Amino acid sequence: DAGVTQSPTHLIKTRGQQVTLRCSPKSGHDTVSWYQQALGQGPQFIFQYYEEEERQRGNFPDRFSGHQFPNYSSELNVNALLLGDSALYLCASSLRLAGGQVRVTQYFGPGTRLLVL
Amino acid sequence: GESVGLHLPTLSVQEGDNSIINCAYSNSASDYFIWYKQESGKGPQFIIDIRSNMDKRQGQRVTVLLNKTVKHLSLQIAATQPGDSAVYFCAVQGAGNNRKLIWGLGTSLGVNP
């Protein structure tokens, strides 16, 4: 039973560039959430995808966008990169229960470490 | 806005001793609480959770205590082992329509042999 996988593991970009990060959820999970974790901080919620739509969003600018595919995998896109976007980007998957309520117990991938120079 | 905080950024214990990590939250309507463990270079790993209709829940070597009166929860680790060294986060689910998890800053636990 594969857990949450993310790619790439590490990435170096320069200011102004665009980046795409990828995530495959745990087998059987249908909801994907993305987090940004700066060094020494707790994860900050970016957004959550379910049924290929963004369902919730944290306090992040429109430069951060995402997508979910029919197989439940997801992408996080960041445009016009800033130095402050350097962080560990975590993907977490969970299962939405009947009736629409999501189990908030989330399973995390290892993350993608992004460095913006 | 809602916030989650921890009392100590670092904690150092002797191997075999019990560890207690604390967390405070601001929204009295929060109804679901989770503890995660994050080892260096890895994503957070679920440890244990508790709902607001309980005040104590036990797992293997771990116990979570919830005090809704003072909006405080704690994670107790019995017989702490070197493998328990990690950063521990509490995460609190917002109430009502806001179901996002709000995370604390984390406590770094070090275990001395």
Image (cartoon, coloured by chain):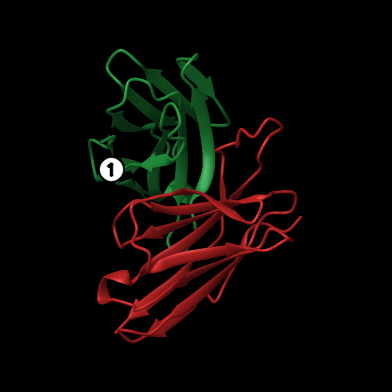
Horizontal and vertical percent for residue B47? 52, 39
In the image, A39 versus A95, the foreground residue is A95
Residue assigned mark 1: B11
* Residue A96 position in % (x across, y down): 65, 40
Residue B81 visible in the current orientation: no
Q: From the rendered image, report the letter of the chain displayed in green.
A: B
Q: Give percent across and percent down for residue B95.
A: 42, 27
Mark 1 Cα within 10 Å, few/some/many (few <14, many 20+)? some
B68 above or below B107? Answer: above
The residue shown at (48%, 26%) is: B63
Horizontal relation, residue A29 to residue A113: left or right? right
Q: Secondary structure at mark 1?
A: strand
Count the numbered circles shown: 1
- Quarter of the picture containing the N terminus of chain B is top left
Residue B15 lies in quadrant? top left
Q: Quadrant of residue A83?
A: bottom left
Above or below A37: residue A7:
below
Chain A painted colour: red
**Amino acid on which disc 1 is placed:** Leu
Q: Chain of mark 1?
A: B
Q: Is residue A24 left or right of residue B83?
A: right
- In this rendering, does residue B2 appear at all? yes
The residue drawn where x is 34% and y is 58% is A60
**Image position of B34 (left or right of A59):** right
Which of the 4 image quarters holds residue A2?
bottom right
Q: Is residue B109 left or right of residue B83?
A: left
Q: Give x and y (percent) for residue A94.
A: 62, 45
Q: Is residue A54 above or below residue B36?
A: below
Say which residue appears at 36% left-offset and 25% top-offset.
B73
